[in-house]
Amino acid sequence: MDRKALKLAFTLASPPDWICPTCQKGVLRIKKDTFFQEEGQASRDRSHEAWEPDWIAYVYSCLLVCTNDQCKEVVSNVGVGSVVHHVYQDYRGEVDEAYIDFFQPKFFEPHLVFINIPDDCPESVSEPLRESFRLFFSVPGAAANNVRIAIEELLTALHVKRFNVVKGKRRPINLHQRIDLLPRKHVLLKDLLFAIKWLGNAGSHGNNGKNEITTDNVMDAYELTEHILHEIYAPKTKKLAALAKKVIKKKGPTK
Ligand SMILES: [Zn+2]
């Protein structure tokens, strides 16, 4: 995951290397003549005496094309932009200034893919993860919350019970307790799951500043989730043990 490409604002002179969501090999490049930017209604008002160029607010839209010749996927992208006053030293060491347009993506269709989800991962888990990828740029808090939903679904897929029956009534078991109920063989994943739970919590309640979730926090949750899913659905140790067994049985290289 290239965090810089996914979180930083970009300039048209150096757009980020977003990885193509379809082939996962090529990068997405802005298709020639498709980038449009306009100032919004409020931004166009220059009447205030204190007006400065950094009050400018753009919306933009463009098409992106995958650089992989075998793929050439087309992705549509929209976002917002602003003007940043940049003071710098030129090659003679003299101080100069410039106003530079910076852009921040808000939405991609099809959505970008942030982590590798193993083929054996149940749809009930991968579906909320894809929903999270869709929301990542526009509502990071909701993106984090969807990772939490994926974790709830993962526990269900691992047969961790969801309800206690108290006096004949079903009472939901909270996520913290469910993680504690994980079978012994997954005990090493508990801390990672608790961490995702906390990030998801912040995503659910975090509009009061203190717990506001950042795209970095969401990417933390993605990395933890990727590791957990691979440990459960595509464990390397299991694959390598099977490979070793094959070589030993053959007493030499396998074909
Ligand atoms: Zn591609």
Image (cartoon, rainbow, N blue to C red):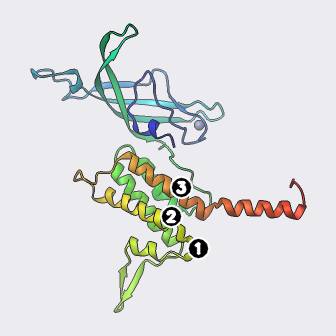
Q: Which residue is labeled 3 in the image?
A: 226
Query: In the image, which is nearer the foreground, mark 2 or mark 1?
Result: 1
Q: What is the quadrant of residue 163 in the picture? A: bottom left
What type is the residue that disc 1 sits on?
Lys
Secondary structure found at label 1: helix
What type is the residue that disc 3 sits on?
Glu
Say left or right for 118 vs 83: right
Residue 124: numbered disc:
2
Say left or right for 240 vs 131: right
What type is the residue that disc 2 sits on?
Ser
Q: CA distance from mark 1 to mark 3?
A: 18 Å
Q: Which of marks 2 and 3 precedes in the sequence?
A: 2
Within 10 Å of the Cα at label 2, are there few (<14), some (14-19), or many (20+) other Cα atoms? some
Q: Position of residue 80 (x, y in %)?
A: 32, 33
Within 10 Å of the Cα at label 3, are there few (<14), some (14-19), or many (20+) other Cα atoms? some
Q: Which of marks 1 and 2 precedes in the sequence?
A: 2
Kindly give the residue lying farthest to the front in the view shown: 93
Q: Position of residue 215 (x, y in %)?
A: 38, 46
Front position in the image: 221 or 35: 221
Q: Which residue is labeled 1 in the image?
A: 185
Q: Position of residue 242 (x, y in %)?
A: 76, 63
Question: Which residue shows up at 33% across the image and 56% down it?
Answer: 203
